[in-house]
Amino acid sequence: QVQLVESGGGLVQPGGSLRLSCAASGGTLSSRNVGWFRQAPGGEREFVAGISGSSGRTVHVDSVKGRFTISRDYAKNTVNLRMNSLKPEDTAVYYCAAAGSRLQVSTQTSEYTYWGQGTQVTVSS
């Protein structure tokens, strides 16, 4: 059973940066598809970025392209989300999720088997 734990959230001013990390226990992330999702108050959980365990291909939703970057740290068995130029509309609980290894990165929550508990990101002055 893979367990995921997110870290790195917090309060940051607009224009600031944060790095979220998703750590796994009970299994390796290196061969899995991993996605980052977020959910704002009153909103649905939405896909932010993902990385393929098979091809290494990454996908970022249009609203974060050029600002957020998903990457793997194989040594630490983590998947990270670097977030730059943060905006108030990025405020949400951020979740990481893992699935089996596939060439394509899914943006659908139903395609992911394992989920972390989430970490709060608040962008405010």
Image (cartoon, grey):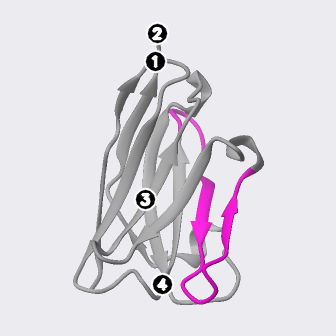
Residue beneath disc 2: 125
Q: Quadrant of residue 102?
A: bottom right
Please state which amino acid type lies under the numbered disc 2: Ser
Verify whether residue 59 appears in magenta.
Answer: yes
Q: Residue at x 49, y 36 (%)?
A: 92
Earlier sequence position, callout 2 versus callout 1: 1
Q: Secondary structure at mark 4?
A: loop
The residue lying toward the viewer, choosing from 124 and 55, is 55
- Which three-letter amino acid code belongs to the residue tagged 1? Gln
Q: Residue at x 46, y 9 (%)?
A: 125
Which disc, if any, is residue 75? none
Residue 13 tag number: 1
- Foreground label between 3 and 4: 3
Determine the CA span between mark 3 and mark 2.
25 Å
Residue of label 3: 80
Q: Which residue is nearer to you in this view: 86 or 40? A: 86
Place of residue 97 in the rendered image (x, y in percent of width and height, measured from the top left): 45, 68
Q: Mark 3 against mark 2, which lies toward the viewer?
A: 3
Query: What is the residue that sits farthest to the front in this orientation?
Result: 75
Q: Is residue 63 above or below residue 15?
A: below
State which region is magenta.
40-61
Mark 3: secondary structure:
strand
Mark with earlier residue (1, 3): 1
Q: Are marks 2 and 1 in contact (CB under 8 Å)?
A: yes
* Location of residue 23 (image quadrant): bottom left
Question: For the residues marked 1 and 3, what is the alpha-carbon distance in whole angstroms?
Answer: 20 Å
- Is residue 39 left or right of 18 when viewed as pictured? right
Question: Is the residue under label 2 in contact with that under label 3 (CB below 8 Å)?
Answer: no
Nearer-N-terminus badge (3/4): 4
Q: Quadrant of the N terminus?
A: bottom left
Q: Is residue 45 visible?
A: no
Residue 32 got which mark? 4
